[in-house]
Amino acid sequence: MNTSFKVIRRKELLNLTGLSYSTQWRLEKAGLFPARVRLGRGSVGWRLSEVEAWVLGRERL
């Protein structure tokens, strides 16, 4: 499956990143986290490929 077009919702996003809601929100507002994608009126998600790249970029050796 091509994950470049898959969009995940907040619950899956928080599980994947291990961040809290407020930490994720602050990072996104500061431009340090992938931007949300509007899916509809009052509905948002995040591109899985961007989130995975962000997670890999934060891994420590």
Image (spheres, rainbow, N blue to C red):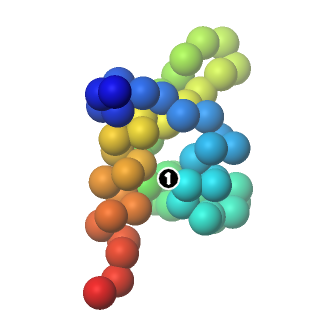
Vertical arrangement, residue 41 with respect to residue 1, above or below: above
**Residue 20, image quadrant:** bottom right
Identify the amino acid type marked 1: Glu
Residue 26 visible to the viewer: no
Q: Quadrant of residue 18?
A: bottom right
Q: How many circles with numbers are drawn on the protein?
A: 1
Q: Is residue 39 visible?
A: yes
The x and y percentages for residue 27 are: 51, 60
Q: Position of residue 36 (x, y in %)?
A: 49, 36
Outermost residue on the bottom side: it is: 61
State which quarter of the image contains the N terminus: top left
Horizontal and vertical percent for residue 11?
A: 69, 44
Mark 1 lies on a secondary structure that is helix
> In the depicted view, which residue is nearer to us: 12 or 40?
12
Which residue is found at the position 43% from the left and 55% from the top? 33
**Left or right: 36 as drawn, with respect to 49:** right
Which residue in the structure is indicated by mark 1?
Answer: 28
Residue 61 x/y as whole percent: 29, 87
17 w.r.t. 10: above or below: below
Q: Residue at x 33, y 64 (%)?
A: 56
